[in-house]
Image (cartoon, helix red, strand yellow):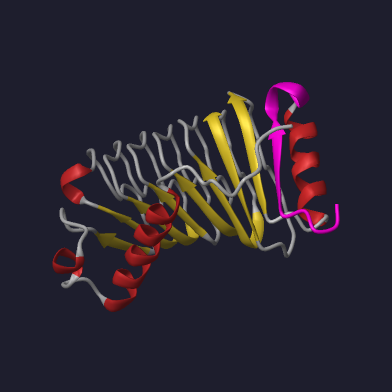
């Protein structure tokens, strides 16, 4: 594996999430910096509980099942999903970055403790449920009860795009109200720390909006 920097995992060949996750960890431990998981078809718990000091990107193509990247604890790892994601993505995220370029289901970022979650598309109800740390940035439409029972961390969304009862039962944390225009003139009125968070989120989306040509094709 020496010198290998990119690899592809074909989900249909391994099928079981435990085998897919074990192969991803094996590649990361071997120094692979870019991994693509191809043909994802609703597998649950993909990349669940990965922990390490890697500096890498994992991209998923297809529709991810529930609890994508749950309990992820890897500061240098960026997980990018290009298809829709089911409920509970980023549950109890400890560290790392999770970028969702398509739609997300219910309870995105439930019990998030750290790291950064960015949703570029619409998300279902209860994003940020019981959030206790980290940053959750919602750039599209948001279902009802955003930030329900928030205890810590920071959640950003545009009030005009959010459903009813945002912040219900919240006891702590911070809410960043995003402006309708997410360009430099639109962001100028934000608190500097909030603006920095939003700019990080937008830069991440811009980085991965197009298909990455650097990830190896399946052989």
- The front one of 89 and 210 is 210
The residue most toward the bottom is: 192
Q: Quadrant of the C terminus?
A: top right
Residue at left offset 71%, top offset 35%: 9
Residue at left offset 78%, top offset 58%: 31
Q: Quadrant location of residue 11?
A: top right
Q: Is residue 181 above or below residue 163?
A: below
Q: Position of residue 33 (x, y in %)?
A: 68, 56
Indicate yes or no whether the magenta region holds residue 12. Answer: yes
Residue at left offset 55%, top offset 59%: 113
Question: Is residue 24 found left or right of 121 in the rendered image?
Answer: right
Q: Position of residue 37 (x, y in %)?
A: 64, 36
Q: Is residue 16 above or below residue 175?
A: above
Q: Position of residue 54 (x, y in %)?
A: 71, 62
Q: Position of residue 166 (x, y in %)?
A: 27, 46
Q: How many marks?
A: 0
Residue at left offset 36%, top offset 50%: 147
Question: Is residue 104 found left or right of 57 in the rendered image?
Answer: left
- The front one of 173 and 142 is 142
Indicate yes or no whether the magenta region holds residue 149. Answer: no
- The front one of 92 and 73 is 73
Give the extent of the magenta segment: 1-15
Does the rendering let one see residue 94?
Answer: no
Does the rendering let one see residue 7?
Answer: yes
Question: Is residue 218 found left or right of 61 in the rendered image?
Answer: right
- The front one of 135 and 32 is 32
């Amino acid at each position: 594996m020496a010198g290998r920097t990119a690899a592809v995992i074909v989900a249909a060949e391994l099928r079981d999430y435990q085998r897919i996750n074990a192969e991803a960890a094996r590649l990361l431990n071997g120094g692979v910096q870019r991994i693509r998981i191809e043909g994802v078809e609703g597998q649950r718990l993909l990349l669940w509980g990965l922990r390490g000091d890697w500096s890498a990107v994992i991209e998923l193509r297809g529709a991810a099942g529930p609890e994508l990247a749950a309990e992820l604890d890897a500061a240098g790892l960026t997980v990018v999903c290009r298809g829709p994601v089911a409920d509970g993505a980023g549950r109890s995220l400890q560290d790392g970055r999770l970028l969702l370029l398509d739609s997300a289901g219910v309870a995105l970022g439930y019990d998030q403790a750290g790291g950064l979650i960015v949703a570029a598309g619409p998300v279902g109800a209860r994003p940020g449920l019981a959030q206790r740390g980290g940053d959750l940035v919602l750039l599209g439409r948001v279902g009802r009860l955003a930030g329900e029972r928030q205890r810590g961390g920071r959640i950003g969304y545009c009030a005009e795009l959010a459903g009813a009862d945002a912040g219900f039962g919240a006891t702590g944390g911070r809410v960043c109200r995003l402006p309708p225009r997410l360009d430099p003139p639109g962001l100028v009125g934000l608190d500097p720390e909030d603006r920095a968070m939003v700019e990080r989120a937008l830069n991440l989306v811009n980085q991965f909006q197009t298909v990455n040509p650097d990830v190896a094709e399946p052989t």
